[in-house]
Image: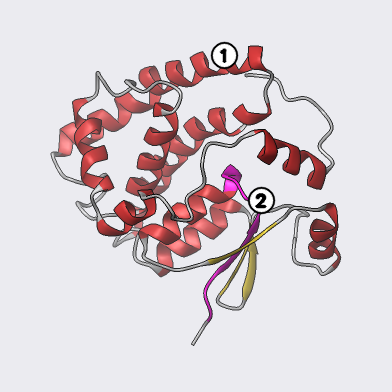
């Protein structure tokens, strides 16, 4: 029997968090090794585990997978969260691509100055409410189903819920004008595996703090400043 997937990343959200979400949604237990020192990172590099010299890296089914999108696609396909045919997969890829774009505006947030964080917060809310949330609101309203694609729970649903919760951390009432998304959030959050992941004590990571930022900068030798979009 194959062992549990093992995730190599920092003890924080970053690009690994969506992988944690998808594994949890599939009901898959996983282990984590947190990078805390430069030496740990260099050991992975020297051992040939990081094809492009980057994390996230996930050990799964005898592979050492890198590139977040490739890892997520593999997990979605393996655990039947990737649609029933090519057309459904195309829709899932489109919808995940949209939520990826939105989450990209938030990913850099912890590394910004206080002034730039306020600017970026406004950007996140503006993009969410004028571009991304209206699109998903329309999808749900037009087909009248419980899930985004094929009326079956998929990677697209997991990714959208993750994005919604991330934006709500920037503006708690951001869904006030989106009744379909409000109902979607409640529906997906009540799925047993998701509900468990949202409970205290799970492997879901909190909002990144200064300690997380300091660790990432130290391990990756990231000594430059990041600017808001």
Of labels 2 and 1, earlier in sequence is 2
Q: Position of residue 10 (x, y in %)?
A: 66, 51
Mark 2 — residue? 10
- Which residue is the extreme one toward the left? 144
Say if the magenta span includes residue 62.
no
- Which residue is the extreme one toward the front? 201
Name the disc covering residue 64, or none: none
Q: Position of residue 125 (x, y in %)?
A: 44, 19
Q: Position of residue 25 (x, y in %)?
A: 36, 58
Mark 2 secondary-structure assignment: loop
Q: Quadrant of residue 176?
A: top left
Q: What is the quadrant of the C terminus in the image? A: top right
Residue 220 relative to residue 158: left or right: right
* Residue 168 vertical position relative to residue 130 in the rendered view, above or below: below
Residue at screen point 52% across, 18% down:
121
Dot 2 crowding, Cα within 10 Å, few <14, some 14–19, many 20+: many
Q: Nearer the viewer, residue 7 or 202?
A: 202
Dot 1 crowding, Cα within 10 Å, few <14, some 14–19, many 20+: some
Residue 31 relative to residue 52: left or right: left
Say if the magenta span includes residue 12.
yes
Mark 1 secondary-structure assignment: helix
Disc 2 to disc 1, C-alpha distance: 25 Å
Residue at screen point 37% across, 48% down:
198
Mark 1 — residue? 118
Residue at screen point 48% across, 58% down:
73
* Residue 106 vertical position relative to residue 151 in the rendered view, above or below: above
Residue at screen point 54% across, 70% down:
5
Highlighted range, magenta: 3-15
- Which residue is the extreme one toward the bottom? 1
């Amino acid at each position: 029997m194959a062992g549990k997937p093992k995730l190599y990343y920092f003890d924080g959200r970053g690009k690994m968090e969506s992988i944690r979400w998808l594994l949890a949604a599939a009901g898959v237990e996983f282990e984590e090794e947190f990078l805390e020192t430069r030496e740990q990172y260099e050991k992975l590099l020297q051992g040939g585990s990081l094809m492009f010299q980057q994390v996230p890296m996930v050990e799964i089914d005898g592979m050492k997978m890198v590139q977040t999108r490739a890892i997520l696609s593999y997990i979605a396909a393996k655990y039947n969260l990737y649609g029933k045919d090519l057309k459904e997969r195309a829709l899932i890829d489109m919808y995940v691509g949209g939520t990826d774009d939105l989450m990209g505006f938030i990913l850099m947030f912890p590394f910004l100055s206080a002034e730039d964080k306020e600017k970026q917060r406004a950007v996140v809310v503006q993009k969410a409410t004028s571009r991304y949330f209206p699109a998903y609101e329309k999808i749900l309203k037009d087909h009248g189903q419980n899930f985004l694609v094929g009326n079956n729970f998929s990677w697209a649903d997991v990714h959208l819920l993750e994005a919604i919760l991330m934006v709500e951390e920037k503006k708690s009432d951001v869904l006030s004008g989106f009744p379909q998304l409000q109902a979607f959030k409640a529906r997906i959050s009540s799925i047993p595996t998701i509900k468990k992941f949202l409970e205290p004590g799970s492997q879901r990571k909190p909002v990144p703090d200064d300690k997380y930022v300091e660790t990432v900068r130290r391990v990756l030798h990231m000594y430059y400043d990041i600017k808001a979009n």
